[in-house]
Amino acid sequence: MPREFEHTDVETLVRDEPKGSKHQLRLWLRLLSCTNLITAEIRQRLRSEFEFTLPRFDLMAQLDREPNGLRLSELSKRMMVTNGNLTGLVDRLIEEGYVRRVDDPSDGRASVVRLTKAGMEIFKKLAAAHEAWLATLFNGLSPEAAERLMKDLAALKHSVVEVGIAYDCNQ
């Protein structure tokens, strides 16, 4: 059963709500808002400057990190999308000459997806632009503020992982 449907007793939820949770709700909404704004801007710039989508960029970024290629199942896990959605993306990138499927050297029945030379060249341009866009978007943060934010977000990530592990263990 999905977590959001496990509790049906609202009074229990409210009673067990940690102190200061309104502040935490506002923080969550602020994080979500920032993520959505940044993602929308990156999507728009990829589309207008390169006629590229963010999912295609993300797939190529995964392949850029793995010169020997990745199986679709591993790509799917890393990108958190279904194999079906991924297959369509891979097929389009193959048609455009940016990726190719090759036999998996460790298992002849499987294949891996790799960037082609053209894929490496376009990804280099995409990645440089992406990095510049993020630098522009984050320009309002001082280096000290950015470092504090990184540390705070690392602490938040640790907290979320720990709570998630404890929650899963109690199931």
Image (cartoon, grey):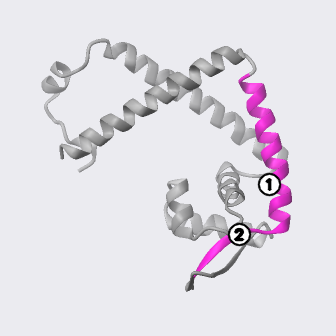
Q: Residue at x 16, y 36 (%)?
A: 8
Q: Bounds of the magenta span?
A: 110-138
* Dot 2 alpha-carbon crowd within 10 angstroms: few under 14, some 14 to 19, many 20 or more: many
Q: Quadrant of residue 12?
A: top left
The one of 10 and 57 positioned closer to us in this rendering: 57
Which percent across, then down, holds residue 24?
38, 18
Image disc number at residue 114: 2
- Left or right: where does residue 2 sit relative to residue 136? left
Which percent across, then down, holds residue 17?
23, 20
The amino acid type of the residue labelled 1 equals Phe
Residue 4 appears in the figure: no
Which percent across, then down, holds residue 83?
51, 67
The amino acid type of the residue labelled 2 equals Arg
Which percent across, then down, holds residue 142?
71, 14
Q: Please tell me whether mark 1 sits on a helix, a strand or a loop.
A: helix
* Dot 1 alpha-carbon crowd within 10 angstroms: few under 14, some 14 to 19, many 20 or more: some
Q: Residue at label 1?
A: 123
Residue 164 appears in the figure: yes
Dominant secondary structure, magenta: helix
* Magenta residue check for 93: no
- Left or right: where does residue 29 sit relative to residue 106? left
Q: Residue at x 76, y 72 (%)?
A: 95
- Distance from label 1 to label 2 (Cα)? 12 Å
* Magenta residue check for 112: yes
